[in-house]
Amino acid sequence: MKKIVLVFLTVVSATFAIAQQAPPKKDFSKINIDRAGDHIMLQLSDDQWSGIPDSIKTNKKGFSRGLNIYVMLDRRFKTNPFWSVAFGLGISNSNIFFKNMGQVPYGIGVSSAGNSTLSFTPTTGEHFKKYKLATTYLELPIEMRYTFNPADENKSWKIGFGVKLGVLLNAHTKGKTLLDFNGSTINNGYTEKESSTRFFDATRIAATARIGYGHYSVFGSYSITGLLKDGSAQLHPYQIGITLSGL
């Protein structure tokens, strides 16, 4: 958590430092301020939660992954085309993996009608080889961007920071391949899936930061709002990954 905040603050500080060092006046007439820079962004990430209590055991050996796809509209400032503001719309999907989760009533009780809070219940008996909680959001990203060479941004360093406003579309758990307590396969083709948004906050706000060169960059995002509704564990999802952008 502290590392994420430190990286985010470092990127933002560097951006403002660059802004303070205004370059000499240049002829911007040859720069196309109406081009569609980084019009599409595809992000692959390692997803984790901060604030996890000891009672919740995520699978550290598994790769909890995320996929974000955004269509962005980028507008450069006419008086200073090094800077631009971008906004758009997209989908964000996150998959967090857990260990020692079994069939209902074990596992994550997303559809448990009798519970007032979301339950995370591991088992020492039969359990799934793979078990995940997946969430999908419709998101509105807003990003301030600084391009070091706006005349040829495909060969330029770039920095961006902003926020994402999201609305929850789906939340579900999925367990695959049932094992016995010794780890031997009981049913290789068995899959159990439960879906419900009852325990999850319907909206979220996340801070974002990105730095890269040309079409490639590394990014980080941290959810300022919690994943679950009041009364549940205060979990804050975050992502660290790579961005492929273009068009």
Image: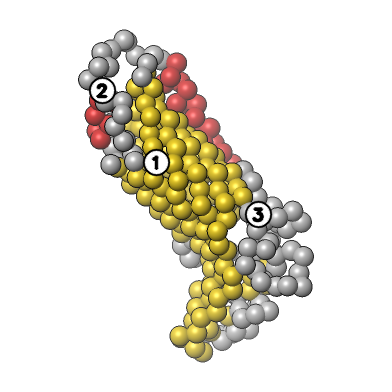
Check disc 2 and report the residue beneath it. Answer: 31
Q: Is 1 on the left-hand or right-hand side of 218?
A: right
For image coordinates 57% across by 55% down, the residue present is: 168
Q: Is residue 63 above or below residue 211?
A: below
Q: Is 144 on the left-hand or right-hand side of 59?
A: left
Image quarter of the N terminus: top right
Residue 244 position within the rendered picture, expressed as x and y whole percent measured from the top left:
33, 46
Report helix, strand or loop for mark 1: strand
How far separated are the C-alphas under marks 2 and 3? 43 Å
Check disc 3 and report the residue beneath it. Answer: 201
Check disc 1 and report the residue beneath it. Answer: 72
Report helix, strand or loop for mark 3: loop
Whichever of labels 1 and 3 marks the residue nearer the N terminus, that label is 1
For image coordinates 66% across by 77% down, the residue present is: 106
Query: How many residues crowd mark 2 within 10 Å: few (<14), some (14–19), many (20+)?
Result: some
Which amino acid, mark 1? Met
Q: Is residue 120 above or below residue 124?
A: above
For image coordinates 42% across by 34% down, the residue present is: 86
Residue 141 position within the rendered picture, expressed as x and y whole percent measured from the top left:
48, 41
Report helix, strand or loop for mark 2: loop
Whether residue 129 is visible: no
Whichever of labels 2 and 1 marks the residue nearer the N terminus, that label is 2
Residue 143 position within the rendered picture, expressed as x and y whole percent measured from the top left:
46, 35
**Marks 1, 3: nearer the viewer:** 1
Query: How many residues crowd mark 3 within 10 Å: few (<14), some (14–19), many (20+)?
Result: some
Image quarter of the C terminus: top left
Query: How many residues crowd mark 1 within 10 Å: few (<14), some (14–19), many (20+)?
Result: many
The quadrant in which residue 53 appears is bottom right
